[in-house]
Image: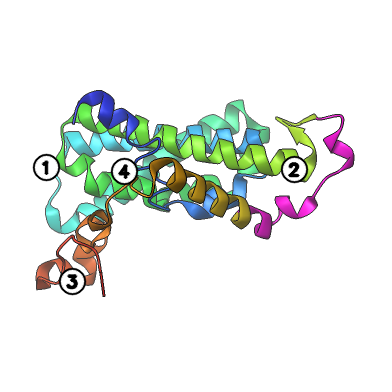
Amino acid sequence: MTKLQNLLKGIIKENPVLVLVLGACPTLAVSTSVINALGMGVAATVVLLCSNIVISALRKVIPDTVRIPCYIVLIAGFVTMVEMVMHAFVPDLYESLGIFLSLIVVNCIILGRAEMYASKNRVLDSAIDAIGMGLGFTLALFLMASVREIIGNGSWFGIAIPVLENYKISIMTMAPGGFFVFGCLIALVNKISKGKAIKKKDFGCASCPSAYMCGKKDSGECTGEGDDK
């Protein structure tokens, strides 16, 4: 895989939200507003980039038996720094994102890329992977937020749209609307990729960052070929 392919894979082929279905909780929660969505996307991308670089640089130093706790500590440190910067320079956005900003620490996208990619590849490749996945996450948030804000609030980026502001469909800003748009975007990605965005075998236990903790990897049950039963 070339560096360009590594960068672009996170946008469609392995989009963390619309293909791998990771980070769905913050995606549904903050996608009622485009501004909030972009803020969350940028924050998560910065954390992902920094954590991937550091974890890749330390991959031969961190003991395998405690790697997950080490990853979480590193990620938490970067999340804290991002929170402090946002609190200082964009307090309104910081308040709007609320607890979901802190929950980046346990975002499956961050920990998943640390375990599946950064811990096995060089620093530059890990940085490119982080940027690609971050762009994919931000794009998914932006698309969802655009649809939900335009239809649900009659605005875009907080700017009222003259015709639509009088014909709001408020359910689009609620949980049911979020799930509806989420499902439609996943269907659209499957249509564009003809259902081949990622091979089924890539969803096996071998790709799960928790495989060691549940014991399947050590017991030989993990084949990495998915569960066809």
What type of secondary structure mainly makes up the magenta span?
helix
User: Tag 4 or tag 3, which sits nearer the N-term?
Assistant: 4
Query: Which label is found at residue 151?
Result: 2
User: Tag 2 or tag 1, which sits nearer the N-term?
Assistant: 1
What's the CA distance linking mark 3 and mark 4?
24 Å
Picture coordinates of residue 208, whole percent (x, y): 26, 58
Q: Is residue 137 left or right of residue 40?
A: left
Out of 81 and 16, give the one closest to the viewer. Answer: 16
Out of 22 and 151, give the one closest to the viewer. Answer: 151
Q: Residues within 10 Å of mark 4 (few under 14, many from 20)?
A: some
Quadrant placement of the N terminus: top left
Which amino acid type is shown beneath numbered disc 4? Answer: Leu
Dot in front, 1 or 2: 2
What's the CA distance linking mark 1 and mark 2?
50 Å
Q: Residues within 10 Å of mark 2 (few under 14, many from 20)?
A: many
What's the CA distance linking mark 4 and mark 1?
14 Å
Contact (Cβ within 8 Å) of mark 4 with mark 1: no
Residue located beneath label 3 in the image: 215
